[in-house]
Amino acid sequence: MRKFNKNSLLFVFAIIFVIAGLWGNCIDQLRWKVVDLAAGIKQGNIQSIFDFKKNVEEISDKMLSYHDLMVDTNSAKENLLGTRVVDKEETLVVKSYSGTLVGNFQENFSDEEISALASGINDRRNLSEKNGAKYIYCSVPEKSFYDGIPENVTSYNLSNLERLSDRLSKEDITYIDFYNEFKDQSIFDVFFNTDHHWNPKSGFKATGILLDKLKSDYGFEYNSEYADIENYTVTTYKNHFLGSYGKKVGTYFTWYGLDDFDLIIPKFETKMTEKHQNEKERTGKFEDTVLFLDHMKKDPYTVNTYGTYSGGDFRLQVMKNELNPDGKKILLIRDSFSCVVAPFLALQASELHIIDDREGDYPAGEMVDIAKYIEKEKFDYVIEIKK
Amino acid sequence: MLFSSTVFLYIFLPLVLFFNFIVFKKSRMLQNINLLFASLFFYAWGEPKYVLVMIASIFANWFFGLMISKKRQNEKLCRFFIVLDVIFNLGVLFVFKYLSFTGNIIESLFGVDLPIPNIALPIGISFFTFQAMSYVFDVYRQKGEVQTNILYVGLYISLFPQLIAGPIVRYETIADEIKNRKETLDDFFDGFARFVVGLSKKVLLANSFAVLADQSFDAVKNGDNISVMFGWLGAIAYTLQIFFDFSGYSDMAIGLGKMFGFHFLENFDYPYISISITEFWRRWHMSLGTWFRDYLYFPLGGSRCGRARNIFNLFIVWFLTGLWHGANFTFIVWGMMYFVLLVAEKLTGLHKKKGRVINIFKWMYTILFVVLGWVIFRAESMGDALNYLGSMFGLTGNTFADGMFTGWFKQNVILLIIGFVLSTPVFRIISQKTKNSNVMGFAKAGGLICLFVLSAASLVSSSYNPFIYFNF
């Protein structure tokens, strides 16, 4: 009797595995692409062949039915092997000593680079004051400030920030160093584990610190009830969010898995409007305007849950508090850290205009000329919150 | 297209198997045509323009093989066609691989400004060119039947399992199997298991070592003064990377060939256990070594001549072996290093000396030169190579160890241990001792299933997946 070849089990498993991966969306997509290719060839369109190749590679790379499970499996393997540093898609993701994901490591900025940064901030301050606005600059905390990173990774972020802070204080610029404010807290309390951003509670707290500073330095009056977390319903969605670093390295690259995500909604009455880019204006309650609850769908690798607050990053966004028509008009110049600040800050203003002026293609859309915008809109306050 | 890609694993291979074993199962001719077109498609996927170079190579070598077969009575004419064949194949190789390099040398030597065109290197050209020449040589030597059907010549030259990264399959090895191969279920399943072993070596081991090796070599290239230990760590990582990458590709090629009924010869035999350089080259990239031995070294006279002539023959072979690997002085120096060591062994008889203690010394000296050789091989220039070697021996004013070494070592220690163990034939020994054990058989199948899933997971995660044969 022929001996049973046990390698046949491997092959049978492989067939089932491959079919399971292709089943569903993958096969449908491949079918459409073959149809497109046939149509392209019929029209003599050579480019359709190259497009087909690119599409097939993308489908097989990204659309397998168990894509997310495979990424999770790979992340667990890397975790077990002791990997701590992954360079992926031009982002260096590092697992810190406490097991949280850290990134965005800067080189040591030269004195000229620090001066240029300080000078840019000073120009913004002068521009604001020239147009009748009071100005404040805020620097956000970064995870690499809080935790040890492996010896084979160097980071000058904190020393760069300290040197910038010195320069800003010499220029007498009203300034909040949020790292100082959050220094005594644990990295797990301030930030997500799988993302570089601070969490919604930290954003809420940062808004309170900002409001206190505006009051103490500029006499800004704000509604203290709106700044009290007790007046909000905080719903914690457990194991809900996979941050941008987590999406790159996988859920189990650290044993913490998915992050919890807090949804903070006012208990008090609200009436607001929100508009960004060329989209239609949204009107209604806080949670229907400045929150984007479709981002709360649990789909770790696809959905950016962090974008629940403010909807993500836009070149220009305007939030209005209809119940505070006599409030101040504020410009917020931001990066992504302001996503969890803007909604709560908007409650304290009549209008909050938000501009993302980061260089490059992200966010999408035409860059706003901030100088012209400030001249045109006549703000009471210009707040800049940056990393 | 690469074997270690989702498009190969999920789309190309299943389709080729389906057509070969289901649709065309009753016709060998149609199976061969299917394999030929699949192979051309496989190559064109990554090199849409240069597939024409391969097709031209197929035509030319088919023609020369046919002419030699028809004019066998006329020895002079046969040799003429052989020379033409060599000129054609090496000419193609020269234009695509060495023209720019040669032009730069002439410019440096004579201070002239030549209009050197920037020609991209078609992937695998060194492999399929040598394979094509092997066809004509073996027809001439009557080691294999001439293929009057150009499709079969095309199939031999372009067969996708070994097309872009070897092994260099000699025509005589599979001449008969082109038409008369017998696919068996055991070969099919064993071939697939071998493919999975190779895939795991490439994706799980080689790619991980690549990350580490790139750190140290890129640092030197960028002018950093790396520490002694970091230099050694990177060199060892590359030593492991190139072994698992290359032998992994060979395993995949041999496994795939077996699935289709082709039996390629082994290409690697645990080279890092070698106790002499002579032995190393009997275990490393054996298909290239035997190609040069049979088609160059022996026709030059081999060792059946005076000592001086023998040394000259070795010089030619090792110069060309180095040059075959890439158009850069680093490869030539690497080849020459082995020439010097092999001659030294020949003259001293070191490789023949036996004894437990002496074997340990021999292994240490062998592995030391192999590792240092890989540093030269990996570096992008002789300057980088010398800088790197200098760092390894503390000659650049560098520290002994630093955070880069400590950090990277800690993160890779498990992988390094696995790499060291799998560089030895320990699993082969265990496998042979337990080949009659049912439990071990199922355990092995289970282990391969896990490796397959982990490899697929790594590919789907778009983890780092370098292709290091772009010089070949």
Image (cartoon, coloured by chain):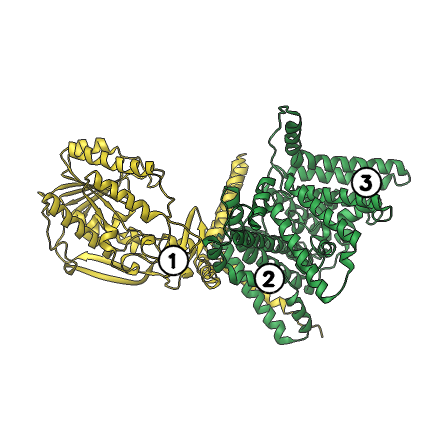
Chain colours: A yellow, B green
Percent x, y of residue B435: 68, 72
First-in-chain label (2 vs 3) = 3
| Labels 3 and 1 touching (C-beta < 8 A) | no
Mark 3 or 1: in front is 1
Can you name the residue that lies furthest to the top here? B112
Question: Tag 2's secondary structure?
Answer: helix
Percent x, y of residue B216: 52, 49
Residue B420 tag number = 2
| Labels 2 and 3 touching (C-beta < 8 A) | no
Residue A174 tag number = none
Q: Amino acid at mark 1?
A: Ser
Q: Amino acid at mark 3?
A: Leu
The answer to whether dots 1 and 2 both sit on one chain is no
Percent x, y of residue A50: 53, 39
Can you name the residue that lies furthest to the right here? B73
Residue at figure coordinates x 63%, y 31% from the top left: B104
Residue B66 tag number = 3
